[in-house]
Structure formats: C-alpha cells, structure tokens
Amino acid sequence: MDNQLDYAPGGYFSISEAGFVQSVNRTFLDMLSIANAEDLIGKHIETVMSPTNKMFFHTYFYPHIQLYERVDEMYFSFRSTDKQSVPVLINGIRQKRGGEMLIDCVALLMRKRLEYEKDTLRSKQQLEELYQATSALNSRLESLHEEYERKQQALLEINRNLETLASTDPLTGLHNRRFFQDCLRGELLAAKDHKAPLSLLIIDIDHFKNINDTYGHPVGDFVLIELARLLRKTAGSRSICARFGGEEFVVLLPTLHSAEALKVAEQIRSAIEQTPLGLHQVTVSIGAETSLSDSTEETLIERADLALYHAKSSGRNRVVHAEQLAHS
C-alpha cells in the first residue's frame, strides 16, 4: 500500500462483498490496536465488531451500500483488541476493481467529537438549568419588586393619612391649631419678603356655652360642624381656615388689606347669621388684624384677639378690626 495512504489521518480498509478484509492501512490498525496487517487481512470484518454492531452492519450498512453503491457518514463502532469501543464515522463506496466487486471504506475516529458532543450537551443542560434558575429568580425578583411597590404605596398612603390626621381637626374637618400656626409662620415670612399684607380673622360663636348647656354637647358638635362647612364656603378659595379651639375659628387671608379683610369677615358674619344650623340660629363675633412691617405671629394673634374682645363687649354679632381700636 502506498505509504501516504498507509498513514493517512483516517482509517482505510477494503472488504469483499462477502465481508472479508482485502487491504487495510496502518491508521485503521492503530485505531483497533492491531500490530500487524496480517492479523486482519483475510479475516471477516465482523471479527472486530461487537455482536450488537454486527447486527447493525448487516441491517443498515450492507443493504444501503448494495442499494445506493455508497454510504456517507454512517455512525458506527468497532471493537479493539482490548475490547474497547472505537466510535467512527464510515464513508464507503462499492466499486469494481480488478474484475472483483469491492467495498472501500474510510473510518474517521469519533472519540474526540463524541467528547465534544457530550461536553456540548452538558453545557447545554447546564445553560438550560441556569436559564430556568435565572428565570425563576427573575420572576421572584419581579414579584418582590411588585410587592415592594405595593408596600411603598401603602406606606405613602399611611403617611399621607397620618399627615392629614396630624393637621386636621377630627370634629369639623378643618385644619387644626398646629397646622394653622405653621401656616401663619410661613405666610407671615412670605408677606414680608414680598412686602404684601396678611390679614387674620378670629371668629367666636356668640353664647355657644348656652347651646351646650341647654341642648347638650352632641348639638353643640353639630353646630360646630355646620359652621365649619359654612366657613369654608364663604371665606374664599385662597383662605386658610382652621379650628383654633373650642368654639373659636381662625381664617388667614394672604395678600388682603384691612378693607378687603373686613369685607370677607362681614360676608362670613352675615352668612352665618342668615343660615340656620339645623334648628338653631347662631351669630359670631369676629376680630380682624392686618400685618404691619414689624408684626410677629404673636402680635398678629394678640391684636386680632383684642379686636374680637371689643366685638363681643360692644354687643356681639359684629366685626371689629384692630385698626379701629387704634383710631378710637
């Protein structure tokens, strides 16, 4: 045999139609750990096959090459002298040579390819497992994120409710005294920064104690609730209304001068006088003050309270501005 063919990178063997080995190269012998070509030439090719592969050879290889004259890349396994499986890819061709029909075959060793396939399969399985684990983790992460968002929104809602409760009078729904004092501080600073006026009204229900003593506190509470509703309606959209304590209410009127504040106060007083609160007719006395350049939170409240005192002491159901006290 030609030396180049003998040591070609693929195993070569030629068999008769009956299956007896006619020639073989060194590479094929090395695949099967056979020392000499004489140990195989003249013997049946099935001597280097396991029983299972003999059956496969008879069932697939022989019929196929008889029918089509060739076999392309048929996966097969030989058996070495030490009983090890030798996986190969066989290419075969049936042709006449020297007056005899022969089958020439080339066998390419598949051991490395199988290892690569196994590694590839393992890698694919690992990737699929990793993908499934990642998908599960991503789903869990999305679920946790959605749960976090829900709890965050719930917490924000709770905080808003707490802020509302902290700044709201529970009976009337108006702002409470604490909220009013925070607003007064901020509005007074803004008024000074913009050199604008800030007016304050303190409203007190006339003879409210008589309502509580005569009809009881539930009726008194009803009157407070209805008066608060009426106050919100008539004080104007820019006003800040709050319950100051007991039967006293306060209204902040940003940017309003004393004359404008008196007009709003009179509207409030008149509306309350003309609107029955359930079965009861009540009146209010109102003290007003408008900020000066040197006004503080305390002086603004004190002067409005002093004006309220004069409104009550001069007959009730009336409005008095602190400026009027200075003039008088």
Image (cartoon, rainbow, N blue to C red):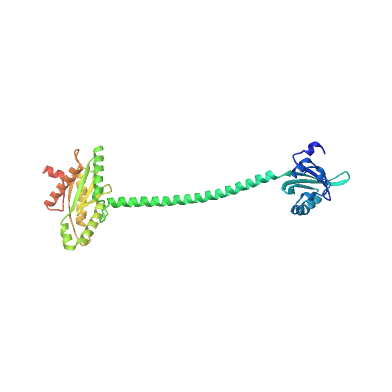
Report the residue at 31% width, 51% height from top. 162
Percent of width and height locating residue 62: 79, 51
Percent of width and height locating residue 248: 19, 52
| Residue 242 falls left or right of residue 36 | left
Report the residue at 12% width, 42% height from top. 327
The quadrant of the image that shows the C terminus is top left
Percent of width and height locating residue 112: 68, 43
The answer to which image quadrant residue 303 occupies is: top left
Percent of width and height locating residue 50: 75, 52
The answer to which of 37 and 227 lies nearer the viewer is 37
| Residue 167 falls left or right of residue 34 | left
Report the residue at 24% width, 54% height from top. 228
Report the residue at 23% width, 41% height from top. 188
Extreme residue in the right direction = 99
Asked if 8 appears above or below 242 in the picture, the reply is above
Asked if 287 appears above or below 225 in the picture, the reply is above
